[in-house]
């Protein structure tokens, strides 16, 4: 494929929107990010990387970390993961508590906050909070071949200091017996996983296995089984953007996951992985410029899974 016109089309489509949307401010340390940033990286199966804008600049991956912890949990525990968390779209905000009462403390899916907290709780119960975070960082470094990836401790502390909503979700689930550790221990790991800082280049490279049946095409390491890779992508397609997941599937048609730090990770099975970053969010918490960039990319490449 000739990438020059594709990248030019993405630049032209995104330019009028740069700076639009609202930077997440409920985590104070995130509110300081410059809203005019935009970066994008596309990594192909050959390892070739195509980039735009601030693709080098690390940002807070936030909820995109949930894809990596879900991969770890499926590897460690297999199907039993689904005893404690569902795999249906929530149709609610990322931090909603409403469904949890009706559904007896079983979160709708692993990509909303409640579901991701349960996933992290499972991992922590099998090892420890420090071990889970260390394993996550080690995997991200190994996948992306970049030892500089780390946690932004200031963001983790800021999120903990303002984390009443996540504590409410976790205690509520504990009241139904769906937490195996102390709430503070599991949330400590959850806040830190969300505070990992990565650039678009590192993120797209680290997730490349998701486009190639769970196997990193460069190192040839099998990160998750083929079956689980397919299913992680299915969950991303149906649940990756909170109450915005249907709209994202309609507009872009790729499995994806957004984070309130402004990142979006999108998987084009058999082709490659795309990471975008632009901090301004829509009302559901998805990066506005990132979604425009991905919409243009699928238009120009024909990479939507619905062709
Ligand atoms: N760390 C964020 C929270 O728990 C993640 C939200 C997100 O990125 O969607 O509120």
Image (cartoon, helix red, strand yellow):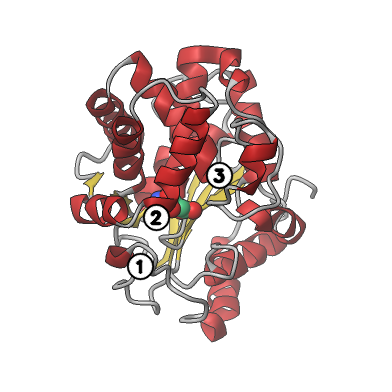
Nearer the observer, disc 3 or disc 2?
Answer: 3
The first of marks 1 and 3 along the sequence is 1
Location of residue 140 with respect to 284 vertically, above or below: above
Residue drawn at (32%, 71%), measured in percent from left and top? 33
Label placed on residue 200: 2
Quarter of the rendering occupied by the N terminus: bottom right
Circles 2, 1 touching at the beta carbon (< 8 Å): yes
Distance between mark 3 and mark 2 Cα atoms: 22 Å
The answer to whether residue 46 of the structure is visible from this angle is no
Q: Position of residue 51 (x, y in %)?
A: 43, 61
Label placed on residue 112: 3
Q: Where does label 1 land, which residue?
A: 54
The answer to whether residue 183 of the structure is visible from this angle is yes
Q: Secondary structure at mark 2?
A: helix
Q: Secondary structure at mark 3?
A: loop
Distance between mark 2 and mark 1 Cα atoms: 8 Å
Q: Position of residue 80 (x, y in %)?
A: 58, 14
Q: Residues within 10 Å of mark 1 (few under 14, many from 20)?
A: some
The first of marks 3 and 2 along the sequence is 3
How many marks on residues? 3
Residue drawn at (31%, 49%), measured in percent from left and top? 195
Location of residue 245 with respect to 186 vertically, above or below: below
Q: Secondary structure at mark 1?
A: loop
Q: Residues within 10 Å of mark 3 (few under 14, many from 20)?
A: many
The first of marks 2 and 1 along the sequence is 1
Label placed on residue 126: none
Where residue 286 sits, quadrant-wise, is bottom right
């Amino acid at each position: 494929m000739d990438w020059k016109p594709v990248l030019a089309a993405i630049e032209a489509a995104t330019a009028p929107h740069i700076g639009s949307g609202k930077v997440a401010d409920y985590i104070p340390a995130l509110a300081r990010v410059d809203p005019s940033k935009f970066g994008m990286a596309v990594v192909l199966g050959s390892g070739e990387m195509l980039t735009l804008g601030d693709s080098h600049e690390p940002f807070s991956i936030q909820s995109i970390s949930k894809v990596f912890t879900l991969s770890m949990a499926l590897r460690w525990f297999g199907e039993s993961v689904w005893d404690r968390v569902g795999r249906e779209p929530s149709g609610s905000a990322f931090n909603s508590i409403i469904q949890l009462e009706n559904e007896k403390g079983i979160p709708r899916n692993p990509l909303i906050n409640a579901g991701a907290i349960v996933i992290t709780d499972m991992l922590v119960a099998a090892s420890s909070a420090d071990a889970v975070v260390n394993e996550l960082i080690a995997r991200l470094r190994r996948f992306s071949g970049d030892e500089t990836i780390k946690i932004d401790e200031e963001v983790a502390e800021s999120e903990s200091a303002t984390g009443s909503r996540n504590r409410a979700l976790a205690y509520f689930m504990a009241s139904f017996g769906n937490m195996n550790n102390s709430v503070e221990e599991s949330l400590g790991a959850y806040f830190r996983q969300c505070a990992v800082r990565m650039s678009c280049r590192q993120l797209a490279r680290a997730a490349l296995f998701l486009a190639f049946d769970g196997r990193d095409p460069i190192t040839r390491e099998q990160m998750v089984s083929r079956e689980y890779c397919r299913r992680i992508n299915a969950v991303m397609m149906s649940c990756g953007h909170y109450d915005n997941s249907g709209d994202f599937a309609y507009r872009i048609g790729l499995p994806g996951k957004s984070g309130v730090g402004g990142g979006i990770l999108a998987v084009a099975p058999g082709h490659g992985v795309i990471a975008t970053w632009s901090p301004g969010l829509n009302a559901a918490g998805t990066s506005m410029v990132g979604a425009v960039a991905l919409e243009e990319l699928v238009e120009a490449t024909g990479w939507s899974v619905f062709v």
